[in-house]
């Protein structure tokens, strides 16, 4: 994700020239990043609600994600007013974290429904385009956005993540060393890193562009 955003920033300020919006390799990289992100969302929902749904934690998580999503929308509107982010990764995680609670006690239903969503989407039998086309003129949403993560198909990945979390399929032996501790630290502070890394990268590259020109 950091590499993807670094490449985006360098391309935005013309330090490099890549077709990040249309080239297949960048589209595939984005899909891999989203699969890792959103599969982890499903797993984390299971871990955060092991015995029972913790309403206090759910509320705290929702408000935190809502605030972070609003910051992303405001910052993207200031930076890219014609293509600002109105339903990006954090917006999606905020909504899917609530919807996913309906399935954390029913992991086999989550797996089956998740697979159905992904299969039907890839067969082009379901998608979110009709909904977008109906609300776009009403809400005056941009025709193109810098980041869009629709519930279909990506909620299917969250549902499969719930199954993986319930069956503990994500567990594997890992030595305790500086590398594993570093990865663990990143995982425990993922939201802060997500919010701050682009501020840091974009600021440095924008400053370099201003200095050089």
Image (cartoon, helix red, strand yellow):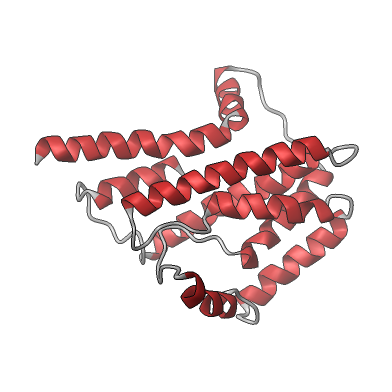
* Number of dots carrying numbers: 0
Residue at 90% of width from left, 37% of height from top? 51
Q: Is residue 14 left or right of residue 175?
A: left
List x then y, in percent, for residue 117: 70, 70
Check the image and name the residue furthest to the top: 177
For the question of whether residue 170 can be seen, the reply is: no
Q: Quadrant of the C terminus?
A: top left
Residue at the outermost front position: 138
In the rendering, at what x and y percent does residue 199 appear?
Answer: 38, 37
Front-most of residues 43 and 137: 137
Q: Nearer the viewer, residue 194 or 15?
A: 194
* Residue at image location 65% in from the left, 82% down from the top: 125
Q: Nearer the viewer, residue 206 or 153?
A: 206
- Across and down, in percent, residue 114 comes to 74, 63
Q: Is residue 100 left or right of residue 118?
A: right
**Image x and y of residue 35, in percent:** 60, 53
Task: Identify which residue is drawn at 60% across, 55% down.
Answer: 92
Identify which residue is drawn at 52% across, 79% down.
133
Front one among 135 and 36: 135
Camera sees residue 206: yes
Above or below, comparing residue 111 to residue 206 in the picture = below
The relative height of residue 25 versus residue 73 in the rendered view (above or below) is below
Identify the image quadrant of residue 118: bottom right
């Amino acid at each position: 994700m950091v590499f993807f955003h670094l490449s985006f920033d360098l391309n935005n300020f013309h330090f490099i020239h890549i077709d990040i919006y249309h080239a297949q390799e960048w589209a595939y990289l984005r899909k891999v990043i989203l699969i890792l992100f959103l599969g982890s969302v499903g797993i984390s929902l299971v871990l955060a609600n092991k015995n029972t749904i913790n309403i206090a934690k759910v509320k705290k998580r929702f408000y935190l994600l809502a605030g972070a999503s609003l910051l992303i929308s405001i910052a993207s509107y200031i930076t890219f007013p014609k293509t600002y982010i109105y339903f990006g990764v954090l917006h999606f995680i905020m909504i899917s974290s609530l919807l996913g609670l309906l399935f954390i006690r029913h992991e086999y239903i989550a797996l089956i429904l998740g697979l159905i969503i992904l299969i039907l989407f890839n067969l082009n039998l379901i998608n979110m385009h009709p909904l977008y086309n109906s609300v776009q003129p009403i809400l005056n949403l941009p025709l193109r956005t810098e980041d869009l993560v629709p519930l279909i198909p990506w909620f299917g990945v969250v549902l499969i993540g719930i199954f993986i979390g319930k069956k503990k399929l994500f567990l594997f032996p890992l030595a305790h060393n500086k590398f594993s501790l570093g990865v663990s630290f990143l995982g425990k502070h993922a939201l802060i890193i997500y919010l701050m890394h682009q501020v840091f990268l974009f600021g440095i590259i924008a400053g370099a562009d201003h200095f050089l020109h």
